Image (tube, helix red, strand yellow):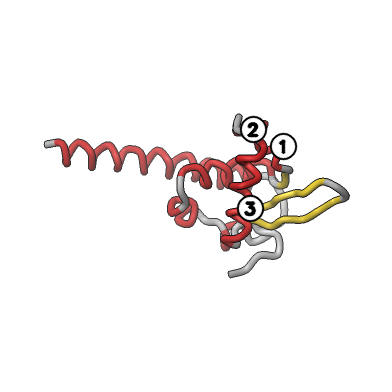
Amino acid sequence: MTDNSSTEEMIRLLREISGKLDRILIQGSSDNEPDDGILDVLDVMTLLTLPDHLRTTATALFELGSATADELAEKTNKERAVESNYLNQLVRMGHVAKSRNGRKVYFSIGEGLGK
């Protein structure tokens, strides 16, 4: 009985996550910005394979477009150092681009990335 309720709960959570990701993707595609390959690099299935903490960071970055670790930490209510660590993990995985403008380091999804 417990296995059945656990499975049902997992299916419910996956549907909820899928719905949220679909809304984010629809919102992102309606911003009248040119398609920069975001869906090729970080699509829904890739997001679902990420651990929760990295998925939260990637989703917030997707919503912001380009951001510093400070800006992302403000959005996610996490410490800047934590977000910086997560962002650098996503950079190493090839899902996020990192660039410097003066002293600030900016992170963005999909710029010039290809696996």
Residue in view at x 29 percent, y 42 percent: 11
Q: The C terminus is located in which quarter?
A: bottom right
Q: Could you say where residue 62 lies in the image, as x and y percent from the top left? A: 62, 46
- Of residues 80 and 67, the one nearer the viewer is 80
Residue hosting label 1:
70
Which of the two labelled residues, at mark 3 and mark 1, occupies the earlier sequence position? 1
Q: Tags 3 and 1 in contact by the CB under 8 Å rule?
A: no
| Above or below: residue 64 compared with residue 108 | above
| Crowd around label 1: few <14 · some 14–19 · many ≥20 (10 Å) | some
The Cα atoms of the two marked residues, 3 and 2, are separated by 17 Å
Q: Could you say where residue 40 lies in the image, as x and y percent from the top left? A: 57, 63
* Label 1 residue SS: helix
- Of residues 59 and 107, the one nearer the viewer is 107
The Cα atoms of the two marked residues, 3 and 1, are separated by 13 Å
Evaluate whether residue 35 shows in this view. no
Residue in view at x 27 percent, y 37 percent: 9
Which of the two labelled residues, at mark 1 and mark 2, occupies the earlier sequence position? 1
Q: Where, by quadrant of the figure, is residue 112 drawn?
A: bottom right
- Of residues 84 and 24, the one nearer the viewer is 84
Q: Could you say where residue 60 lies in the image, as x and y percent from the top left? A: 60, 40
| Crowd around label 3: few <14 · some 14–19 · many ≥20 (10 Å) | some
* Residue found at the far front of this picture: 81
Residue 88: mark: 3
Residue 75: mark: 2
| Above or below: residue 36 compared with residue 69 | below
The Cα atoms of the two marked residues, 1 and 2, are separated by 9 Å
Q: Nearer the viewer, mark 3 or mark 2?
A: 3
The total of numbered circles placed on residues is 3
Q: Could you say where residue 78 lies in the image, as x and y percent from the top left? A: 60, 33
Along the horizontal axis of the image, is 14 left or right of 25? left
Residue in view at x 63 percent, y 33 percent: 79
